[in-house]
Image (spheres, rainbow, N blue to C red):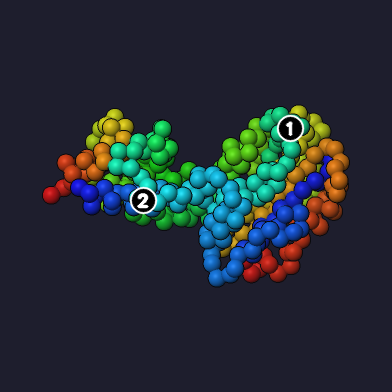
Amino acid sequence: MDQLINNLKKQIVESLNLKHIKPEEIGDDQPLFEGGLGLDSIDALELIVLLQQTYNIKIANPQDGPEIFKSVKSIAAFIKTHQPA
Amino acid sequence: MYITDYCHIRNHALFHSGAEIYKSAGGGNLDSFLSETYQSLKISYPKFYKMDPLSKLGLIASEVLLRESDWKREHTPEQMSLVLANAHASLDTDIRYMESTKTMASPSLFVYTLSNIVAGEICIRQGIKGENAFFIQPAFDANFMVQYVDQLLSETKTEMCLAGWVDVMGEHHDVFLYLTRKTRTANAKEHSEESLQKLYQFNYGSVDQQS
């Protein structure tokens, strides 16, 4: 799980062009959107693309998005339970 | 109407009213030049990194012209207008977006596939709420720019206008932005076709063919 979280932090920084942030500066439980990393709606779409392209996971119900993308840890947990075998 | 300040970005160098304020050490590409320039100006605006090259060029030039300007003390946001033009519209980003669709379309590239997004980014960053327009023309047209901006200054609530040329295609980049206002200030130049063309051609020569 720790390795997955570390990889996710690097992938988020890379795919969202967060060049002002180092991956290790992102907290596992830090909110990614309001009051946290300050991501916006376009970033949310890029995160969906990241899940699809890198982990081959599609989000079936868009309403689950806010819960899945709450933090790096919640994304990692979602990947763990949904990644194809 | 008077030109009070101007900025060029050409051949990996940034000039403010004719004075070089940053020049790339060489060897890098446009993207690295833009990041270096952003850092050298000590701008704190993380959204910069997410922008396409056209918006980055416009943002840097507007920052140079407006960050030490007193326009917000003298005028309301609605009294500052923005008029931009270029030759390649958003083609540079359009092509990269098309490339991304071969695997998975990039949402963050898609939002920059309109030429006037650079105008929106400048307005958001600088707090400009006046008229804004973006024109696509074969080359910088000083006569058109003077007529359009003068009309804004004389017939609307516009008191100041940020105007000019911001063009990018691959490694080619050519930026000339300037500030106009109704009142003359020290070292101001007349907002005429002749003076504008002369300012645009500053340090131009063969630079365009090389970049």
Give the number of marks.
2
Q: For residue B198, what is the image quadrant? A: bottom right
Determine the residue positioned at 29% across, 42% down.
A28
Which residue type carries mark 2?
Pro
Give x and y (percent) for residue B34.
Answer: 56, 57
Q: Is residue B130 visible?
A: yes
Q: Chain of mark 1?
A: B
Determine the residue positioned at 66% across, 39% down.
B133
Are the numbered discs 1 and 2 placed on the same chain, yes or no?
no
Q: Is residue B115 visible?
A: no
Q: For residue A58, what is the image quadrant? A: top left
Q: Quadrant of the C terminus of chain B?
A: bottom right
Along the line of sight, the residue nearer the viewer: B186 or B96? B186
* Distance between mark 1 and mark 2 Cα atoms: 40 Å
Residue at numbered disc 1: B73
Residue A69, compared with residue B110, is above or below; it is above
Q: For residue B117, what is the image quadrant? A: top right
Give x and y (percent) for residue A7.
Answer: 28, 52
